[in-house]
Amino acid sequence: MSSIPLSSLFPTLSFLPSLSSFSVPTSPRFFTSLHHPPTMTLPLVHDTMNLIMDNPFLCLAIGLLLIFLLQWSSTPALKDVPTVKYHALLPDFLNRIFYYPNAIRMISEGYYKYKDRIFRMLTGDGEVYILPMKYQKDLRRLPLAKVSSLHAQYENALGDYTHILLNTELVSLTIRKRLTPNLNWVKINANTLFNRLIAVSASRLMVGDALRQNEEWLNAVITYAHSLGITLVLLRPVPKYLRPLVAPFLPPIWHMNKSVRLARRLFVPIIDERRRAAQENPAYTKPDDFLQWMLDLSEEMNECIPASDISTHMLLLVGLAVTHTSTMALCHAMFDLITKPEYLKPLREEIQRTLQDGWRKGTQAAFADQARLDSFLRESQRFGPPGDLSFHRIVMQPLTLHDGVVLPRGIHICFPAGAISMDPRYVSNPLAFDGFRWCKNPEDRYAMSPELVKSSPVDNEPEKNEDTASNTPASWVTVTETNMGFGYGLQTCPGRFFASNTTKIILSRLILDYDFKLVGDKLGERPANVFIGEHILPNLDAEILFRKKSLAF
């Protein structure tokens, strides 16, 4: 397989001129307002009853809601497991609704209260069982047939409405096998900028030059990821039984359906043409891109997947698995860099050292040598992970753990990754952002305080603030018991290495060639994260001012 130069995957940043400490969000105390319900006058009651009786559809909706509320109680699949609720006196259906604005606080509360026990949380999707760390070794090597990340992703991403596919592992298997000077300030929305950069870059790798500059495709990728996020916000708090009634009326679902139709219109002819050429012409030279790798692997597996399904996979892969996740990481890292400018100088020194021949000639080995940037990204993800829970699995058959606990078939399990990463038992001074804490080399570890280098422990000896689950400081994409940002175990995210390279390439270019600051910077105040249930997003409205340096690298 011929290699694709890293620099060729990324645009020239033409959008540009020539080109926090950890906190649990304060939750509104809904329960206090329930003690003092507003007084409803008799005329208002009468008018309301008339409205209901005159509207048969409203009567039906209320009847269905009442039936649902009566049935939506909780019978734990696991006995003797404590349940963390928003408030113990509220009925279960209200606790499920209040989970979404309060999930981060509740997960942290459950973790510190039941550290060595399984505890349960009530969500709109059902029950989620959060496991303690002692069960990680029991579960990490289990195959898909026993605990399924695919089914958990389908549930988390509302697969019934967002086109997530369950019928094949082709995408993850393919990744595992084949990837592992204007001086004026220009204002750009961070989320929009990085979405576009990643979409163009990922499309180059996924399908070559065929769609890399196709505006319809790029807009579909960005729209799909954005619409899926909005759908999760709107639909996950809705009870499962009511979602089929609500979903058809949500505009973001219309937009996702439109993106899927476009992906099929663009990809099906490409796939059909490639398959036909391979059958009819023995001398046919296959393209060297991800789409072709998927087609080849599907033949090896004797898994004949319809072109329409592969098209949907490509949209999901580029729009969600690559563009969305890498954009989130880039936004978090940029906000941390801007509000902690003391890291720019040591990072710039490292980038200049590792990219001595310039950004465009950077190799994968050169980016792998960027220990400081790698550590900074890991620390940024520790404070801004994709979610507070990780290792989502649906138990496909009963499992007996090492201490005799039996996990029944069908339950949703996970680990409290966010709380673990902030536990002082595993990370010293966990509430402090220490961008180089994960560096192994003392010169890198203490780049902010060179005077400490001579007094640092000998190389390879565990330092006080290392990841205690690893003998040496782990990299951003290294999965350990306490670093589960990319998952954990046998079904760990296979695209994390591509995400790491993508993020480092873009950040290296920005750090070397541009000055940047936040629009309306308030004395270094970081744009607040957005919390949606257990999911954590960077501020999607924050804008950054960019200015190209007079002497770009």
Image (cartoon, grey):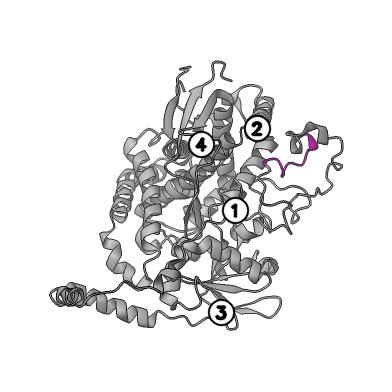
User: Which of the 4 image quadrants contains residue 195?
Assistant: top left
Please report the residue visible at 35 percent of the width from the left and 45 percent of the height from the top.
223
Q: Is residue 290 above or below residue 424?
A: above
What residue would you read off at disc 4? 522
Q: Residues within 10 Å of mark 4 (few under 14, many from 20)?
A: few
Tag 3 secondary structure: loop
Q: Amino acid at mark 4?
A: Lys
Real-space CA distance between mark 3 and mark 2, rounded to the nearest whole angstrom: 51 Å
Real-space CA distance between mark 3 and mark 4, rounded to the nearest whole angstrom: 51 Å
Look at the image and give the residue range highlighted in magenta.
Answer: 435-443
What residue would you read off at disc 2? 342
Real-space CA distance between mark 1 and mark 3, rounded to the nearest whole angstrom: 26 Å
Mark 3 touching mark 4, by CB under 8 A? Answer: no
Q: Earlier in the sequence, mark 4 or mark 1?
A: 1
Q: Is residue 205 above or below residue 488?
A: above
Real-space CA distance between mark 1 and mark 2, rounded to the nearest whole angstrom: 25 Å
The answer to whether 65 appears left or right of 314 in the picture is left
What residue would you read off at disc 1? 485
Q: Position of residue 398 (x, y in %)?
A: 58, 78
Please report the residue visible at 49 percent of the width from the left and 63 percent of the height from the top.
102
Q: Earlier in the sequence, mark 1 or mark 3?
A: 3
Q: Earlier in the sequence, mark 3 or mark 2?
A: 2
Real-space CA distance between mark 4 and mark 2, rounded to the nearest whole angstrom: 17 Å
Q: Amino acid at mark 1?
A: Gly
What residue would you read off at disc 3? 408
Mark 4 touching mark 1, by CB under 8 A? Answer: no
